[in-house]
Image: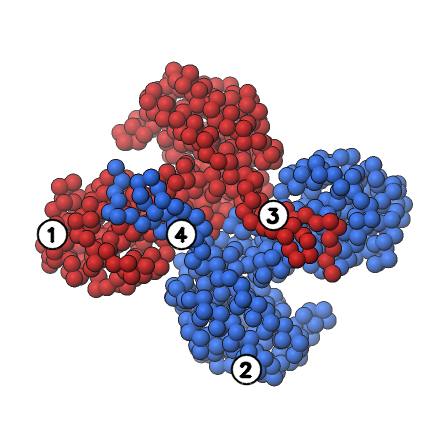
Chain colours: A red, B blue
Amino acid sequence: MALASKQPDIPPTGGFTDAEEASSGEDMSKYCRRIAEQAKVAARKLAGVSTSIKNDWLDRSADRLQHRVEQVLEANRLDVSQASGMGLSPAAIDRLTLTPDRIRSMADALRSLSKLPDPVGEILGGGMRPNGLQIQKVRVPIGVLLFIYESRPNVTVDAAAIAVKSGNAIILRGGKESLHSSSALVSILEETAKKSGVPEHSLQLICTPDRNAVGELLQLADCIDLVIPRGGESLIRRVVAEARMPVLKHYDGNCHVYVDEHADLEMAIRIVRNAKTQRMGVCNAAESIVVHRSIAEDFLPRMAQDLRAFGIELRGDPNVLQILPDATPATEADWSTEYLGPIVSVRIVDSLEGAVEHIERYSSHHTDAIVTKDIASARRFAQGVDSAAVMINASTRFNDGGELGLGAEIGISTDKLHARGPCGLQELTTYKYIVTGDGHVRE
Amino acid sequence: MALASKQPDIPPTGGFTDAEEASSGEDMSKYCRRIAEQAKVAARKLAGVSTSIKNDWLDRSADRLQHRVEQVLEANRLDVSQASGMGLSPAAIDRLTLTPDRIRSMADALRSLSKLPDPVGEILGGGMRPNGLQIQKVRVPIGVLLFIYESRPNVTVDAAAIAVKSGNAIILRGGKESLHSSSALVSILEETAKKSGVPEHSLQLICTPDRNAVGELLQLADCIDLVIPRGGESLIRRVVAEARMPVLKHYDGNCHVYVDEHADLEMAIRIVRNAKTQRMGVCNAAESIVVHRSIAEDFLPRMAQDLRAFGIELRGDPNVLQILPDATPATEADWSTEYLGPIVSVRIVDSLEGAVEHIERYSSHHTDAIVTKDIASARRFAQGVDSAAVMINASTRFNDGGELGLGAEIGISTDKLHARGPCGLQELTTYKYIVTGDGHVRE
C-alpha cells in the first residue's frame, strides 16, 4: 500500500468534520491523539447509556441505511472506480462492491443486533460474604476499541454496531480502498447516533490513507484499551509488534479433520468435503486431513475421488502416496500451511494420540475436528486438542459466531487470554467488582 | 541487583537437577528454552490430570512441609545470612525470614486450596442449536505460566499450588535473595508431585540469579502463555516492555475514598482510618481522600485529628488548607502518588461528578470507595468509576481474593482484559468450545 501523502484525505461524502479538520493542517500525531481522547470521553458516557437508546440507534440506523441506498452506492462507486488503479484483484473488488442487496443485509444485521440481549450490567457472580459484605461481579464495557480491517465496507457497519451495543467506543481504521464507502456509512451512523442519544464520538472513522496513523494509534495505551486487527497475517504481526495495549487476534486457521479408526466413513467424506470445499478462503476451512492407518486404505481413495471432483489437489506423506500414487508429495512446510484454496494436506497416523500430537504441533489452534463413532476417542481428542473449537462429527465450518449462537461476531480469536473463538457482544466486555457494606472495615 | 556470574548457581539443598545441569555449562538461552519446553509438555499432561490427584498433591505437600520444617529453615537461614550483605532492608529481611509458624501457614494454605473446587472442566455455557449441534463452552487451563516475583518464600508455594490446582504448569522466577529457601520448598513440592502423579516439570524453579534469564524467558511465546510479574513498578514495566506474550499485572494501587455529601461522617472516619492505616504498605490501602464541599468543614477536622493520631501526614489542595491550615500543600504529583506509607492526599470537590472526574483522572483503577447514605449517589459512583473494585460504604482493604470469596489469589489485576481484580483459580483458566454433531455440515 503506497502512501498518497502524510496529510489525511478529505472524503467527498458526508459531513465528516474530523477528516476536514485533520486535512486543514493538523499533524498526524495530534489528529490521532484527538480521536483517541474523544473516544475515551465518549466511552465513559456510553458505559452508562441504556439498552433502549442503543437499540433505538441500531433500528434507526437500519432504516436510514435503506433510505440512503443511493448515497452509499454513489460513494462506493467512487471506491470501486479507483480500485483497479490500486491493483486490487477482481475478488477484492467484488468484496468491495456494494449492491442494494448487500446494503439490505447490513440493515438486517443491525436489526438482529438490536434484538440481542445487552451484555452490560449482567451480574456474573457474587453473593453475601460471612461478614455481610455484598459482592457483585458486574459485566461492563471494555472502553475504547481500535478496529483495523481491510476492504469490505459492511465490516464498518458490523463492527461499529457490535462495539456500541456492548457499550464500547470504537475507532475504525478501514482499508483506504473502501474509504469513501466507509465514510458514507459512518456519516449515517453518526446522524442516527445524534437522534437516538448515543454519545458523540462513540464511533469514529480514521479518515486518512496514511499508514502512519496506525503506528500512532498503537502507542495510545492511555486511551485505547484493546486493538482488534482483522486481515492478513502481515497486518496482524505488525499490530502485535507495535501495540502498547492488548490485541485480540487470530493469525491463521490451519484447521484439521481427523478421521478416526472408528469413523463412519460416509460421514467422514461429507465432513471433509464440507470443511474443505464449502468456502475455501475462510479461516475455518479445513487445510489438513489426518487419517488413522487402519481405515486409510479404505477411506483415502474415496476421499480423494470426492475432493478431486471439486478440483482439490492432495499433498500426502509417503504412506498416503502408497495408497494415492497420484497425490503430490507433501513437504514439511505443507503441514503448517493455510492454503485458503484448492489444496489439502493428508497424513496417516498410527493412533489417536498420533493425531493429537500432529495437530498440537502444526495446528493454529483455531478449529480441529474428529470424525468417530467411539465416545472414548471423542473424549480423548476433545481433551487433548487445545484449540479454540474442537468439533466432534461436525464440519470445522461451524466455528463462527452465528453458528455457535453468539448472534454476531467481530472476529475469531486464537488467543487464549480474555476471549477464545468467536468474539461477540460478551467478549467485548470485562467486569468490575461492586462491593457494598454498611461501614465495613477490615480487622 | 548485581550479577554474581552468568552461570546459574547450584543451590545447596534439594536434588534440583535443572540447576545442576545448567551449572555444568549449559548456556542461559538453552537452559531457559529447555525449562519452557519441559513446561509445555507438562502442561499438556496436567490439563488432563484429575482433581483428586491434584488435591492429593496439595495435601501431601502440606504434610511434607511440616515434616521438613528443619530442612526449610536451614536453607532459609542461608538466605537470611546473605541478605544483609545484599543490602536488603530490615523490613525485607523480615519478609524473607521463615519461622515454624510461617511454614505452618504455608501448609494451611495448601490444605485450603485442596478444598476449593477445581475450575477445570466447568461448563460455562452452551446448549443445543436449532440444527441439533450441541455447543459446550468448557473451562480449561491456560497452559504455561511464568511467575516473576520478589523475596517472600511463601509466594513460591502459593503460586505453584494455585497454578497446578488450576491445571497450569508454572515456571517460578523468584528473587535471588530467597533462592535457597525457594529451592528447598520446590524440592518438597516436586517430591510429592512424583508421589501423587502430578506430571514432572509441572512446577520448575529458575535456579540462577542471572537477570538475563528473565529476558530470555520473555521471548518464548511459543511455550509460555502468560507472564505474571509481582513486585515493584520497575520490574513490571520491564516485563511489559519485553514480553512477547500476554502479561497479567498491576502497576500500583492509588486508591481513593470519596466522602459524599450524604455520608454518615462517623462511618466515613472509620472507613478512612481503616483504608489508610490498617496496613499502609499494600496496594489496596487508600492514598487519597476526596471530600464533598458541603461536609468538608464538619468532616475534615475530625478526619485530620483521627489520622494524625496514627502519624499520618495530610497533603491538601488550597480549599483543604483553608480548613486545615496545618496540612501540607499538595502538588500535582501528589494526586497520582501511591505513598504506601503515612501520607494521604486530600481534595475537596463540588459534586459527586467532580469526585468521579478526579478519580477517573488520577486513580490507578485498582480500588475506589464511596461513603454515602444516598442510594442514587452510590449508583452514580459505582457506574462512573471504572476501577477493578468499587466499594460502597466499605474499606478499600476488602479488594483481596480472600475477602471477595475467591479463596486464594496469585495477584490483583488492574488490567481490563482477561481478568480484573483478584486473580484466583478461575482467572488462571480460559475456555474452549466443544461442538458435537451427528455428521453436521454447513449449508
Mark 1: secondary structure: helix
Q: Which residue is at a point 32% across and 45% down the rendered structure image?
A: B133
Q: Which residue is at a point 16% across and 58% down the rendered structure image?
A: A295
Taking the image as shown, residue B134 lies to the left or right of residue B279, namely left
Mark 3: secondary structure: strand
Judged by depth in the image, the label closer to the viewer, 1 or 3, is 3
Q: Position of residue A227 (x, y in %)?
A: 48, 41
Name the N-terminal-most of marks 4 and 2: 2
Q: Which residue is mark 1?
A: A301
The numbered disc on residue B12 is 2
Q: Give the distance between the C-alpha atoms of the residues marked 1 and 2, in whole angstroms.
A: 62 Å
- Three-letter amino acid code at the position of disc 4: Lys
Q: Which residue is mark 4?
A: B432
The subunit carrying tag 4 is: B
Q: Are marks 1 and 3 on the same chain?
A: yes
Judged by depth in the image, the label closer to the viewer, 3 or 2, is 3
The subunit carrying tag 3 is: A
Q: Position of residue A248 (x, y in %)?
A: 45, 45
Q: Residues within 10 Å of mark 2 (few under 14, many from 20)?
A: some
Seen from the viewer's position, the closer of residues A92 and B367 is: B367
Mark 4: secondary structure: strand
Q: Which residue is mark 3?
A: A136
